[in-house]
Amino acid sequence: MKYSCPRPPQFNLKVKKGTSGLGLFAEEAIPKGRFIIEYYGNVVTDDEAQYIGGRYLFELGNGKTIDGTIRENKARYANHSCKPNAEVRIQASRVFVFSTKNIKAGEEIVYDYGKEYYDYYIKPHGCRCTPCEKKKTAK
């Protein structure tokens, strides 16, 4: 199923280098509890997602997955963090990113990717989110 027209971001956002690769950064302050951006792409079945593979797949939990590999999907650059400032909310087959804290201009937008993703992709190589990197350098 082709993706529906995404809800436009409510704030100016920029993709640039972060501690764990390319990241999504706020170009202006974002208050707590506000919609930031929609994660979108083609909606496929979970079986199709297994065949496609990759890191830009977002499971919806209803037998469907969003294939977020399309370049226009800036939300795919929001990285994982063990101390997030945002969260995802799934509504039907759509994924929205909301701020859970006040986010300052220039700050990276990050959310917790969840245990399954963390255990499979992040844990084997070590977490590179800013809080974890700070812990490593403090030791």
Image: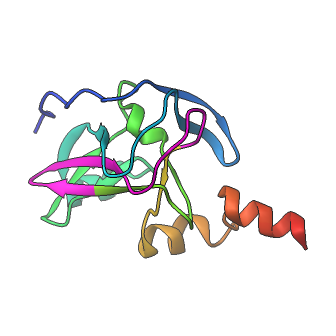
Q: Nearer the viewer, residue 66 or 135?
A: 135
In screen coordinates, is 4 left or right of 87?
A: left
Q: Nearer the viewer, residue 89 or 63?
A: 89
Residue 107 located within the stretch drawn in magenta = yes
In screen coordinates, is 28 left or right of 57?
A: right
Magenta range is 89-108
Q: Residue at x 25, y 36 (%)?
A: 41
In screen coordinates, is 65 left or right of 1?
A: right
Q: Residue at x 59, y 65 (%)?
A: 122
Task: Answer with the quarter of the image where residue 86 lies.
Answer: bottom left
> In this view of the protein, can residue 128 be seen by the observer?
no
Picture colour scheme: rainbow
> Where residue 120 sits in the image (x, y, percent)?
51, 70
Q: Residue at x 30, y 45 (%)?
A: 34
127 in relation to 103, above or below: below
Task: Answer with the quarter of the image where residue 7 lies.
Answer: top left
Q: What number of labels is visible?
A: 0
- Quadrant the C terminus occupies: bottom right
Residue 23 located within the stretch drawn in magenta = no
Q: Which residue is drawn at 50% across and 45% down?
A: 103
105 in relation to 65, above or below: above
- Quadrant the N terminus occupies: top left
136 in relation to 57, above or below: below
> Where residue 110 sits in the image (x, y, percent)?
50, 51
> In this view of the protein, can residue 67 be seen by the observer?
yes
Q: Which of 2 and 87 is in front in this view?
A: 87
> Where residue 97 sits in the image (x, y, percent)?
32, 47
